[in-house]
Image (spheres, rainbow, N blue to C red):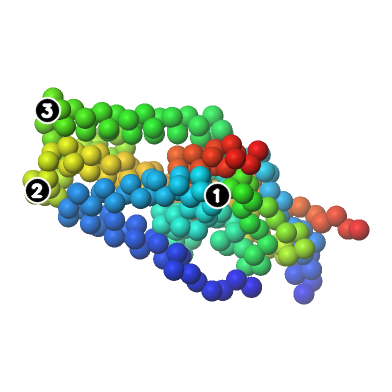
Amino acid sequence: MKTEKHWYDYLWIAELIYFGLGFFNILFAWAGLCMFFIPLILALAGWDKAYCNRYCGRGQLFALLGGRLKLSRYRDVPGWLRSRFFRYGFLLFFMAMFCNMLHVTWLVFSGAENLRQVVTILWVFKLPWQWAYSGAVTPWVAQFAFGFYSIMITSTVLGIISLLLWKSRSWCVYCPMGTMTQLICKAKHE
Amino acid sequence: MGQLSMKQKKHAVVNRKLCVACGSCQKVCPMEAILVYKGLYAKTDEARCIGCGRCVKECPASVITLEARHEN
């Protein structure tokens, strides 16, 4: 029987700390790049989907909210959401939004745009977030932080909505990082 | 005992083509009878699986089913 807990079973706490720090100082959003690159590096280095399977704090957080706190209804995720079409389509959409964020950062870097101290949730809703930036760094560094934090918050909001409607880790079905790491594994092993 | 033996007549089977290899099944399996294989799909160990159905309930992609064991 499986009983022992490992250090990596508590990475959901790091996820909460990340969002907490970003609330007070947006520059901590840069740390989120770890959650972007580590899964890809692990997959490329032969650890396959170890990040999803063990180290994903977000997945753990969703499992905790949906399972332990019983917030999930445990209904089947609709077929269209589980389809490859949606999964790969969402990956493309997410990457397009990521590139857009990089473009806005470039515009601020080049002086064509001013820094926007907002966090955008679900690509539409702009929340003022000016208290989290003191002006200590060059504006493009802060712009990237606001943009990246927006992406991290958006994916978490989608994950929470998904767990409330369906199963705890419904987000994993269309998580862009999960899709990318599985594509790497397919390219390596199939 | 009767209920347990009824359950043990079934075991978890994964639809490998549709599995997203998230590993939520291996986290909840009390027997460590299911593992993600090379990041591609979850793979069950029929001998270890007790057919409890926890992986079926947890799987977000709904690709795990309980099926009758093949008796040799």
Residue A16 at x, y = what percent? Answer: 32, 59
Describe residue A109's horizontal placement relative to residue A95 as left or right. left
Circle 2 sits on which residue?
Answer: A136
Residue placed furthest toward the left:
A135
| Quadrant in which the C terminus of chain B appears | bottom right
Residue occupying image coordinates x 70% and y 56%: B44
| Element type at mark 2 | loop
Of the residues shown, which amino acid type is indicated by label 1?
Gly
Of the residues shown, which amino acid type is indicated by label 3?
Gly
Describe residue A68's horizontal placement relative to residue B12 as left or right. left
Q: Nearer the viewer, residue A96 or A84?
A: A96
Q: Dividing the picture into quarters, in which one does residue A120 lie?
A: top left
Residue occupying image coordinates x 45% and y 64%: A8
In the rendered image, the vertical position of residue B67 relative to residue A95, given as above or below: below
Within 10 Å of disc 2 (Cα), the crowding (few <14, some 14-19, many 20+) is: few
Chain that bears disc 2: A
Residue A76: in sight, yes or no? no
Which badge, 3 or 2, comes first in the chain's sequence?
Answer: 3
In the rendered image, the vertical position of residue B42 relative to residue B48, given as above or below: above
Circle 1 sits on which residue?
Answer: A46
Residue A31: in sight, yes or no? yes
Within 10 Å of disc 1 (Cα), the crowding (few <14, some 14-19, many 20+) is: some
* Whole-number angstrom distance, CA of label 1 to CA of label 2: 40 Å
* Whole-number angstrom distance, CA of label 1 to CA of label 3: 42 Å
| Element type at mark 1 | helix
Circle 3 sits on which residue?
Answer: A111
* Whole-number angstrom distance, CA of label 3 to CA of label 2: 17 Å
